Image (cartoon, rainbow, N blue to C red):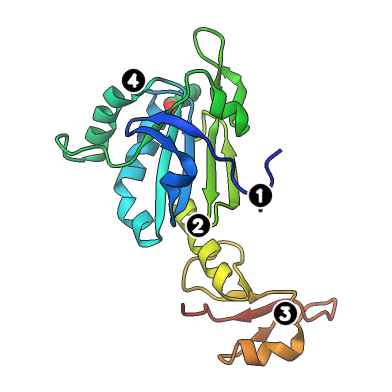
């Protein structure tokens, strides 16, 4: 089983941009691998179009994106035309991110992305809607797994990236519904005698019935 903190498995795959080696393709970037049940399906088309429109946001965060669907590259290439149109993208422009083919479900099985409740017409399981975030050290940092009938929220995926990148660089954690710029929590592992030095901007301790001073807020660190 793949655990957060593991090196994300490397693999070679045929994609709409030719054969890639996943780790080489990532280079020094963060990466998001997101899977889809199958081509020419409505929810998937809205998701891939949304990714197309969010590419500048991913680029700002040094994140490369790559899709995966169980169908062939030839099918993906045809489907990309629909996705571009749905996204309001110029149809003559090259589709700007790769989509992996996984007709034999080899990668889906390797990465635990199969949904055994969703079958194709031949009775083969389809891929679920997985989101895997990998950092520039190829470390597996985050996983989401949705069923075929529930489309993902890509604003949440950007929020996740902001949190991962911020908390890699500052001794904070991001609370419920946090957005970039909102107050953060001081890491519970940071000893009290270091708090002033690490957060000269100040920390507010929220009083709680337990009397334990663990809920310590500070303004969002500027990076
Ligand atoms: C969709 O993308 O719309 C979809 C795909 C498989 C099952 C249900 C919905």
Mark 2 — residue?
Answer: 136
Which is nearer the N-term, disc 4 or disc 1? Answer: 1
Give the quadrant of residue 213. Answer: bottom right
Marks 1 and 3 sit apart, C-alpha to C-alpha, by 25 Å
What residue is shown at x 45% (from left), y 38% (from top)? 21
Q: Which residue is mark 1?
A: 6
Q: Which residue is mark 3?
A: 190
Element at label 2: loop
Secondary structure under the numbered disc 4 in the rendered image: helix
Which of the numbered marks, if any, corresponds to residue 75? Answer: 4
Q: Is residue 119 above or below residue 95?
A: above
Quote the CA–CA distance across marks 3 and 4: 52 Å
Picture residue at 40% right of the left edge, 59% below the top: 62
Q: Nearer the viewer, mark 1 or mark 3?
A: 1
Q: Of the residues under marks 3 and 2, which one precedes in the sequence?
A: 2
Is residue 151 placed above or below 6 in the rendered structure?
Answer: above
Q: Earlier in the sequence, mark 2 or mark 4?
A: 4
Q: Residue at x 28, y 30 (%)?
A: 80
Q: Position of residue 215 (x, y in %)?
A: 72, 76
Work out whether residue 146 or residue 172 is closer to the camera in this orientation and state it: 172
Q: Quadrant of the N terminus?
A: top right
Q: Nearer the viewer, mark 2 or mark 4?
A: 2
Please report contact status of discs 2 and 4: CB closer than 8 Å, yes or no. Answer: no
How far is mark 2 from mark 1, CA to CA? 13 Å
Q: Residues within 10 Å of mark 4 (few under 14, many from 20)?
A: some
Q: Is mark 3 within 8 Å of ligand 1?
A: no
Distance from the alpha carbon under mark 2 to that under mark 4:
31 Å
């Amino acid at each position: 089983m793949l655990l957060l903190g593991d090196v994300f498995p490397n693999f070679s795959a045929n994609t709409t941009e030719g054969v890639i080696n996943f780790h080489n393709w990532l280079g020094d970037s963060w990466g998001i691998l997101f899977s889809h049940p199958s081509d020419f399906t409505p929810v998937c088309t809205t998701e891939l179009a949304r990714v197309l429109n969010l590419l500048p946001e991913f680029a700002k965060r040094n994140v490369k994106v790559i899709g995966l669907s169980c169908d062939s590259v030839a099918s993906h290439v045809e489907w990309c035309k629909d996705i571009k149109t749905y996204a309001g993208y110029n149809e003559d422009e090259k589709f700007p991110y790769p989509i992996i083919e996984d007709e034999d479900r080899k990668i889906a099985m390797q990465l635990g992305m199969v949904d055994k409740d969703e079958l194709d017409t031949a009775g083969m399981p389809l891929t679920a809607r997985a989101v895997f975030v990998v950092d520039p050290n190829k470390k597996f940092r985050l996983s989401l797994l949705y069923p075929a009938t529930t489309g993902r929220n890509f604003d949440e995926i950007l929020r996740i990236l902001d949190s991962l990148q911020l908390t890699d660089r500052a001794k904070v954690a991001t609370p419920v519904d946090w957005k970039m710029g909102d107050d953060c929590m001081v890491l519970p592992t940071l000893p009290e005698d270091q708090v002033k030095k690490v957060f000269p901007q100040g920390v507010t301790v929220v009083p709680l019935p337990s009397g334990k001073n663990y809920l310590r807020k500070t303004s969002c660190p500027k990076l």
